[in-house]
Amino acid sequence: MGEITVTINGSQLSGSEGMTILEAAQENGIDIPTLCHRPELTPIGACRICVVEVEGSRTLVGSCHTPITQGMVIYTHSPKVLETRKVIVELLLASHCGSCFMCDKANVCELRRIAADLEVGLPRFRVRKRYYPIEDVSPYIVRDLTKCILCRRCVRACNEIKKARVFGIAYRGFDSKVVVDFDQPIDKDVCQDCDVCISFCPTGALSRVKKLGEEKKGKALVISS
Amino acid sequence: MIPTQGKKQEDLLILLEEAQNKLGYLPEELMAELAKSLDMSISDVYGVATFYSFLSTKPQGRNVIRICKCLPCLLKNAQAIIESVERETGIKPGETAPDGKFSFELTNCIGACDEAPAMMLNNEVHVNLTPGKISQILKACK
Amino acid sequence: MPEKWIVLRNCGVIDPKRITTYLDRDGFKALKKALAEMPPEQIIEEIKVSGLRGRGGAGFPCGLKWELARKAQGDEKYVICNADEGEVGTFKDRYILERDPFTLIEAMAIAGYAIGAKRGYIYLRAEYHHLLDLLGKAISQAREKGFLDHFEIAIHEGAGSYICGEESALMESIEGKRGEVRYRPPFPPSRGLWGKPTIINNVETLMNIPQVILNGAHWFNQIGTERSKGTKVFSVSGDVKKPGVYELVLGSQLRELVMDLALAEKVKIIQVGGATGRIIPYDMIDTPLSFETILGAGAITVFDESRDIIDIVHRTIEFLAEECCGKCAPCREGTEVMAEILERFSCGEGVERDIGVLEELSNAMMLSSLCGLGQAAPNPVVDSLQYFRSAYESRIRKN
């Protein structure tokens, strides 16, 4: 494997051949936000939150799937990049449920964390939410697709890790939806002692059926003045 | 319903197209059967079936009318054609007639803009439409 | 600059059902010449020197694409002809396929030999189902005559999806899947259909190949402008007296095409390149048509003074929202939000800050969308805000 030298945010760094921009950045302590990407899963480049500026490229590029090449000059937090990420988060929030104060995912929600980090609040456009009834037929898993941001992490986790192929993507465009069979409420025995998809969901779209006496998730939210 | 011997996952779209042509729509039993014989999940088969606008997972009329609603046709008064189809068939876009004779849809550009307004009736393209022509064409349908 | 028929030279001249009429017009001579006298590298060099660029909209140099695929490692390689023209207002490929399927077949056979592929696909949109039979028969006639001994061509029919004209979505569709786009790199010449080196060329691009081989790169190179060689086939529709297909030398003026040939009157707006193309006012009708200026896939839709720009943009964005594959967030959510804003403007319910929002949205979509559709989807919004801003301002709701 050859060594590749790149410049990220003005500093010369080295990485190995085949590495993505995201990996090279992370290895050097540069944090790029991601939503659809997880190192355990095949990259798909769907959410576009991880876009970065590469000199000589007409558009921004997805850092989770673009390999580094020799001499690449990359900016991970330029004004252009930040403005774009903000609009994407704003778009995702516009069709997202929006009732964070009563969502179980609370302060461990990745969308909410990224929105806070980029200082994105209420979307400026009239929102067009996707409304789906909550699916609580299964004794093991609750799906609230109104909170789904179509990152497909559940689909990939189920296919690639559990190999149970429970989920698929159906319909097209804005109507795209993570479905089970013929778009039926989830109720599969295979989900009994799994939880893989739940652990991969960045928002509150997938959760366990609530039981009493469970430990609190994440750190307690502390509001200091 | 559709022979799948020796077929692979890559043949899925072709098989769905075949079934659509033969049965007029894609019944759930068929999709489940395809999933089984191609070793795929039902959700993946359903995902492909619902992506393409010429595939339908709900029963369709014996004749599917698709009027082009893109700009070149609209400029040539496609709206009048849409209205005359509504009058002739008694159904609105997105509906299927109760007697199962017609399904009526609006579709995106069908590449007949030089002879707008245009429509597809099943697999046939009809061009330079007028309300009079619509009436004739639809009368000839079985 | 004049009309010139390179791509359309056989259209209306030969009988598309009879290969003999094609043979009488130098048919398959280029293939014979290529196979007998030219090593693959020489063919590719010839195409490169000719300056031929892709006619599907992106304008990528054809010879370079072939060279990359030729040099790529792979036990199998593929040639794909993109006959999925779905851009609103485009019908030139249909016109060509209806009248001259043989040139396309010859070109694909040459392409196969040049890059080392044994198999080719024609991806035909479902709306062109009526051409299936004609194309199939043309392929079998070519096979019977022994022109396809080295190369097999299959037709793959689409099922109603504009995005499948996008090369990566098209390959997904041939693989039997949802027509969702892939990220790049890798690009198709290194990893395309089933992960194998693949070239994807538009119908019109391929139609030029036999003439380039027969007449030489220099002959082709003399036609057109500095960076736009050869001719372009245009589909003209809308408010014109003579809608139809026209082939002009690249660099010809839009005026010549719209006013002199298609006989438009009282023109207000011209959409060049379909839904993802550019929208320009009549003032700019003296713009030359080339890769350097405006071109797209050659769809020209003309709107006269009675038409409303906001309505045009609204319907265009609605089309794109319907046809978006749904994979990447900026395009999936952005087209939907844009359509909603434009709908309000079209009924006089715009809000002051919407204009800024539209601009920011456009910018983000152009910069971050996964494919050409999402990146070009804001074009009609951006152009109309530039040239027809007052139309937006007059639709802002007054309290």
Image (tube, helix red, strand yellow):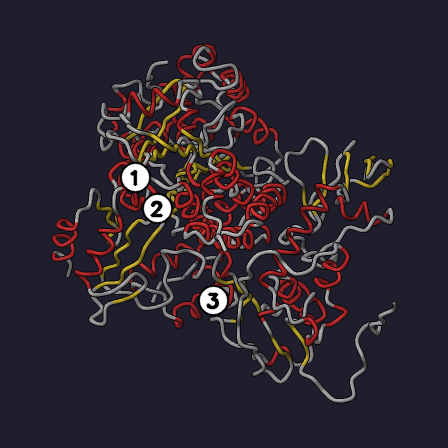
Which SS class for mark 1? helix
Q: Is residue A61 visible?
A: yes
Q: Residue B113 has which mark?
A: 1
Q: Amino acid at mark 3?
A: Ala
Q: What crowding class fits label 1: few (fewer than 14 Cα within 10 Å), some (14-19), or many (20 or more)?
A: many
Q: Amino acid at mark 1?
A: Cys
Residue at x 43%, y 61% (from the top left corner) = B49
Residue for badge 3: B35
The image position of residue B8, as x and y in percent, is 47, 57
**Chain of the residue under label 2:** B
Which SS class for mark 2? loop
The image position of residue A79, as x and y in percent, is 74, 42
Marks 3, 1 in one chain? yes
Looking at the image, is mark 3 or mark 2 earlier in the sequence? 3
Which SS class for mark 3? helix
Q: Nearer the viewer, residue B100 or C257?
A: C257
The image position of residue A133, as x and y in percent, is 53, 76
Marks 1, 2 in one chain? yes
Q: Residue B70 has which mark?
A: 2
